[in-house]
Image (cartoon, rainbow, N blue to C red):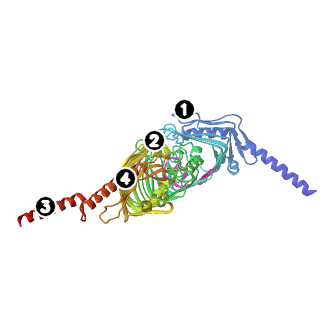
Amino acid sequence: MRWIIRGLGLIVLVALLAAGALLLIPSKRVAQLAERQFEAATGRAMTLSGDVRPTIWPRLAVRTGAVVIANADWSKQGPMLAAKGLEIGLDPVALLQGKVKISKVEVLSPRILLERRRDGTGNWLFAPPGGTAPAPAGSTDKAPAVQGAAGGIGAFSLDNGEIKNGTITWIDHATGQTIALSKIDASLAIPSFTGPATLSMSAEANGKPLTLSGTLGAFGAFMAGKVVASDLKARIAGSKLAFKGDIGTNPVAAQGHLTADLVDPAALAAILGTAVPDLPRGLGRKTIALDGDVTLAPEGSMHLRAGKLTLDGNHLKLAADVTFPKGRPLVKAQVEAGALDLSGLTGGAAAPAGEAAAKAKGGWSTAPIDASGLDAADAQLSLSADSINLGVAKLGRTRVQIKLDHGKAVVDLRQMAAYGGDMTGQLVVNGRGGLSVATDLTAKGVALRPLLTDLAQYKRLDAKADLSLKLRAAGNSQAALARSLAGSGRFSFGKGELQGLDLVGMLRTLNLNYVGEGAKTIFDAITASFTIDKGVLSNDDLTLTAPLLSAAGKGTVNIGARTLGYTVTPTALSKADGTGGVKVPLLITGPWAKPSFGLDVNALAGSKIDAAKQRLQDQAKQELGKQLGVTPQAGQSPQDALRKKLEDQAKKGLLNLLK
């Protein structure tokens, strides 16, 4: 019984102490003190409305009604903070000593507005009445000292500050960017005003989870806009960022080491309220990863050194600078790559269903080529790569200079190994108001079979070639580009073979069956020049030389329709000096993937008639010689032989007269 009485007495004592504590808590005094000190320190009015009441559970504290903190006088967006209420935790030991020491501040359902005006000034930079206003971005004036260290906020400490179920809206009037965060739960610990602060936060951005954690090396200096050491980590919708270095807010500036792993960059940009183009596959459509030393200068320029950049499956080493000389991003970079896959620029791989169907029918793809990414920024790039896959063509060791200006890319080829040879020249891709391309190329020693296989699935010609091209085309698909192709060029092939066609066999037998698998024509050289208009290549000076024949060619190649209409006239040589040959004109028509071969009947009939006439004349002359007893000598016509015989007989008669 004695212990029961003692226990009840203890409970009564605790209740009395709690009641006494409630009486000791100066609720209104705490609220008024908070209002006065906040306005004195910041120059902003803080209004605590509703009941202000003390609590002892779960902590000794004061709870308020609605809270409003005024915005900067230049803002037109409403209050900087509006919350359902505050809970201000008190140190009970200090309270028993007659002092008010705040140990915790909890903000309930706050709506926080952060703004930056065009000159870079943030609404979070405070100045006390009569104090110095925060200097705008770019100003050389130092931030005001505390009262001096945090833009007018007096030194304080906070064991724990919390935000529950809040929202933050960021508005940047310089860039037009707006970011909204909701469902914010955050905590901030400031053991010492001049020491480090620890922050952790979870929120949602457009329904996607976001977390932020890290430390600031000197809280007071950071609040004053000065640059301080930091270690920050963020995660949003599967993307991760980490920064360790120095960071400041007035003006915004940073220098340190950055790592970023961005998944689905387009979706991430939409979440953050920024506009990012639909990047091609291979250039960051799915993944962008960055590791390097970065600098964000006060004027807004960005600089990267010792950078390692991953764009989907492409891995690059680079140094880069991003400036905004005319309000548009200008990227200057030096890039080194191993195997670089740019097939996404031409739709050359992972073709959509429409493109696959077009290829299955033997035509060019009609799938749209999206060139909008060319207008995302201006650029001056120096690129070197061990190899480049363009989808429609594959390149070896490459060194190029690239200039990108308002959607127009000019590529100067300084070195390009391609298909066993070398190429130099210039390529222009213009995405302004549609897609157009132009090229001026010179190639030497290029292997034709793999090149034509990649470009047009044509595998019949195998040789090394020297080539010069000037071409232009316009259209938003491969089919449109092929139909609009125009220009001119010249080529010369060395020793090689034309597969699927045996011209020598055809000439020897006048049989068109010398085509197909296993048939081929071996040649020593082929030369030709050509012009192209509206996707149709025209040529009239093709010359082929081979051990047993020569050939001339002329006709058209419809690149847009992928068809041939060409005549090759081979001559089988019977003598070393090229005389005595047999000519058989050969027509090559139909789709170039499966062409048809036939004899030019009209030309062949004409040659047979001429040959028949000559045979009749020769027979008549021989018969006349027999009747007159004349036998022509080698290389001598029957007429000359007869004349010679008459002259000889006349001479003999004259001599007989003189005897």
* Residue picked out by circle 2: 136
> If you read the primary sequence from the N terminus, does the residue marked by circle 3 or circle 4 appear first?
4
Name the amino acid type tagged 2: Pro
- Tell me whether circle 3 and circle 4 mark residues in contact (CB < 8 Å): no
Name the residue: 58% across, 38% down. Answer: 80
- Tell me whether circle 2 and circle 4 mark residues in contact (CB < 8 Å): no
> If you read the primary sequence from the N terminus, does the residue marked by circle 4 or circle 1 appear first?
1
> If you read the primary sequence from the N terminus, does the residue marked by circle 1 or circle 3 appear first?
1
The residues colored magenta run: 210-237
Label 4 neighbour load within 10 Å: few <14, some 14-19, many 20+: some
Name the residue: 73% across, 48% down. Answer: 59
Name the amino acid type tagged 4: Ser
> If you read the primary sequence from the N terminus, does the residue marked by circle 2 or circle 4 appear first?
2
Of the residues tagged 2 and 3, which is closer to the observer?
A: 3
* Residue picked out by circle 4: 607
Q: Residue 631, how many percent across, how many down? A: 25, 64
User: How far apart are the alpha carbons under marks 2 and 3?
Assistant: 125 Å
> If you read the primary sequence from the N terminus, does the residue marked by circle 1 or circle 2 appear first?
1
Relative to 381, does residue 509 appear above or below in the rendering? below
Residue 624 appears left or right of 301: left
Name the amino acid type tagged 1: Lys
